[in-house]
Image (spheres, rainbow, N blue to C red):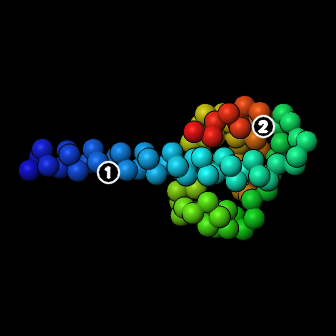
Amino acid sequence: MAQITLRIQSHWDEIERLALQNSRYRAVHYLLGLVPAEASGRVVVTLPARKVLPAAHVAVTPETLSRTLHALSDEDLIEVAGDAVTILDVERFGRHMH
């Protein structure tokens, strides 16, 4: 029984990892789409509707979007304050689509 539980947990962890990677790509792509065309360096974008609309746009739950944004923040790629997302370096951020 313990072995089955470990295998199930392992599969669940893999599914979550794959889902978050895919959501990461979509979230980065979405945020880059909010950046003005000629912007570079540090840019602040505003999320509409406090993550509900962006989450629907990238086809994830608001909770998954929050986890994805938190992971990007932990990597010092963005800062999140309410509905404002500061992309610390647009060029560097764009390289983290995967």
Question: What residue appears at the point 53 percent right and 64 percent down from the top-left corner?
Answer: 61
In the displayed structure, 52 sits above or below 47; it is below
Determine which residue is flagged by label 2: 90
Q: Where is residue 1 in the image (x, y as percent from the top left)?
A: 8, 50
Question: Foreground residue, 83 or 9?
Answer: 9
* 5 left or right of 16 in image: left
Residue holding disc 1: 12
2 over 65 or under it: above or below: above
Provide residue 33's location: percent of width, then percent of height. 77, 52
User: Closest to the observer: 78 or 18?
Assistant: 18
Q: Which dot marks residue 57? A: none
The residue furthest right is 38
| Of the pair 35 and 69, the residue shown nearer to us | 35
Q: What element carries label 1?
A: helix
Q: Dot 1, how many residues are within 10 Å of its Cα: few (below 14), some (14-19), or many (20+)? A: few
Q: Where is residue 80 in the image (x, y as percent from the top left)?
A: 70, 48
Counting from the top left corner in percent of width and height, residue 4 is at 14, 49
The amino acid type, in three-letter code, at marker 1 is Trp
Name the residue located 75 percent from the left edge and 47 percent from the top edge.
32
